[in-house]
Amino acid sequence: DERSKLVGYRMFFANVGVLFTFAAGFLYFFTPTAEFANGQLNADAYPGFALLLAVLMGATIFWSGWGTRAAIPFLPVAPATPHLGLGRVLWRVLLDIGAAMRSVSFRWLFFGVLVVFVMVGVNGGLDLYVFTYFWELDRAAILLVICAYPVGVLVGSLFCPAFFRRFGKKAGLIFGGLSWAFWQSLPIVARLLDWLPANGEPLLIALLVGMKVIQGASTVQANVAFGSMVADIIDEHEYTTGKRQEGIFFAASSFSAKATTGIGNVIAGVALDLISWPRGAHIRTAADVPPETLVNLGLVYGPVVAAFGFVSIWCYTHYRLPRERHAEILEELGRRRTRPIQAPSGAPASGA
């Protein structure tokens, strides 16, 4: 499936960027200093890090836009519309979003991804605390564990098209969601049950790296499936409404991802308050944190966050656009695009 391959490529290169980000952060900006043995705790390192990423993101966006100009002549041409004022434009956008939400499949995918990115936000907000205090990893070990996930994504993205051909996109979405929840919880639960080597043991780091690679390789099936399924829903929307509106669907998806990731970061901060996380510059190692607080941190980061994954999976089960129906829609859309445009009954013929 060409569409799944394209989304897979997108995920592949996105995670190349993630790997570069981690490498630049841990190998250059967050190096230890005399004042901060853990460079991640040095607030002065972050402005330069943020500036580098901003410049690289801007350059990448420009390169992507400039490099795809050759595809413009082959894009569908939108019908001409009269010039509208700002108020009318905003009103039409709201109407278009409402029309998109009338699609049962998109509505459930949208709500499912809302939950997912809340989890992603909480996960990202607590990563530093979990790696530094719960697992007691040094800078090099943190870099290995963090980079293991995108490495797994790079590997797993290569197998997405074959997985979808065999099991379908909906199965890939559900499988990826279940895998993320399972591998998010497993290391935390195993540590609390004392099934893992002690903190600081090389075997522990190897196990954490291995589990992150597997988590990334299996979860990417959901990432790629989601993007491909939204594109399929756009075909269905065109079939039922006659309008081709990729921008509305992908903008709604992107907005939900970005907005709820921020909400997830806020929830992570609230969770730290609820477990009475200690504050102050003196909190530098696990020895400075009460043991019960560390246990609660692990529970929030692992089982509690992962439990919300089942809510998103329940949403995904309501997706109602199977492969066979989508093939029929594509066939009909192809006929419409090649069919001559006929004047409505009673209308004068062109040139009359």
Image (cartoon, helix red, strand yellow):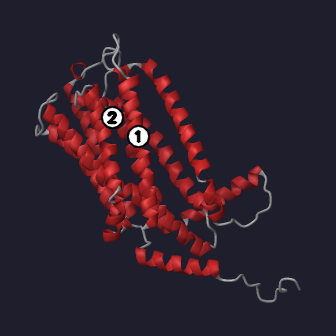
Question: Is residue 280 found left or right of 105 in the rendered image?
Answer: left
Q: Which residue is mark 2?
A: 127
For residue 133, what is the image quadrant?
top left
The spot of residue 171 in percent (x, y) is 33, 65
- In the structure shown, which secondary structural element does the residue marked by tag 1 occupy? helix
Give the crowd class for mark 2: few <14, some 14-19, many >=20 residues within 10 Å. some
Q: Which badge, 1 or 2, comes first in the chain's sequence?
A: 1
- Can you say whether 245 is above or below 309 in the image? below
The spot of residue 64 in percent (x, y) is 56, 48
- In the structure shown, which secondary structural element does the residue marked by tag 2 occupy? helix
Res. 311 visible in picture: no
Q: Nearer the viewer, residue 104 or 246?
A: 246
Q: Quadrant of the C terminus?
A: bottom right
Identified at 38% across, 23% down, the residue is 30
Disc assigned to residue 212 = none
| 3D distance between C-alphas at marks 1 and 2 | 15 Å
- Residue reaching furthest to the right: 352
Q: Which residue is mark 1?
A: 18
The spot of residue 52 in percent (x, y) is 50, 29
Res. 57 visible in picture: yes
Q: Nearer the viewer, residue 332 or 16?
A: 16
